[in-house]
Image: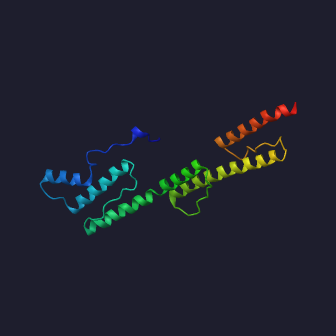
Amino acid sequence: GRLQGNDCPTPGPMAMRGDSLIQAETARSGQLPSEQDRALAEIQSVIVEIMKGNFGARANLSAGEKDKRVLKSFNEMLDLVLIPFRVSNEYFEKIANGDELNKIDENYPGELAQFKENINHAVESLANVVQESGALSSDISKGMIHSRANVSGHQGRWSEMLEKVNTSLDILVKPLEE
């Protein structure tokens, strides 16, 4: 289901800030941590930041050359995984503001293709409702008071909304016919 504010996972004992984890390991073992331990600590610190909602957190690439490649790959993976989140956030903001929406034209593989199709379907559904409302408004402004929105091409809440518009028009027109 959906995560709510209190449902977000809390960091476990290994999910300390990278520096704190290194210090704790050094104190426990009496040895300096290896490059691999430092890279792991850095990845864990990024995970903690992401769990806090900081999706811009990335691993610090100042590790040794071998681990720098691993951390860079980790950062690139995060960037790729966050694409759908950022795109959907952008579209939700546009929907909330009533901005014009365009379909996504880029090609995406796998589950990202389904994500793209879902957004494009939402964009198309909203555009169809706006178009139907505009056509109805145009008809009414021309005196065609018996014109109604075509509900059949719409689904779910969109259909329900247009049915309510039609019902409202029926209520308004009825006294004019008496």
Who's the residue at 27% across and 65% down the image?
62
- Image height check: is 63 above or below 155? below
- Image height check: is 175 above or below 148? above
Q: Position of residue 28 (x, y in %)?
A: 14, 50
Who's the residue at 39% across and 56% down the image?
56
Q: Position of residue 59 (x, y in %)?
A: 32, 59
Q: Report the side of 109 relative to 159 (left or right).
A: left
Who's the residue at 27% across and 60% down the image?
39
Q: Position of residue 38 (x, y in %)?
A: 24, 59
Residue furthest right in the image: 178
- Image height check: is 168 above or below 33? above
Who's the residue at 36% across and 56% down the image?
57
Q: Report the side of 30 relative to 169 (left or right).
A: left
Q: Report the side of 45 relative to 24 (left or right).
A: right
* Towards the viewer: 144 or 27: 144
Q: How many marks?
A: 0
* Towards the viewer: 119 or 177: 177
Residue furthest left in the image: 30
**Which of the 4 image quarters holds residue 74?**
bottom left
Q: Quadrant of the C terminus?
A: top right
Instruction: Name the colour scheme.
Output: rainbow
**Which of the 4 image quarters holds residue 163?**
top right
Q: Report the side of 3 relative to 140 (left or right).
A: left
Q: Position of residue 171 (x, y in %)?
A: 78, 33
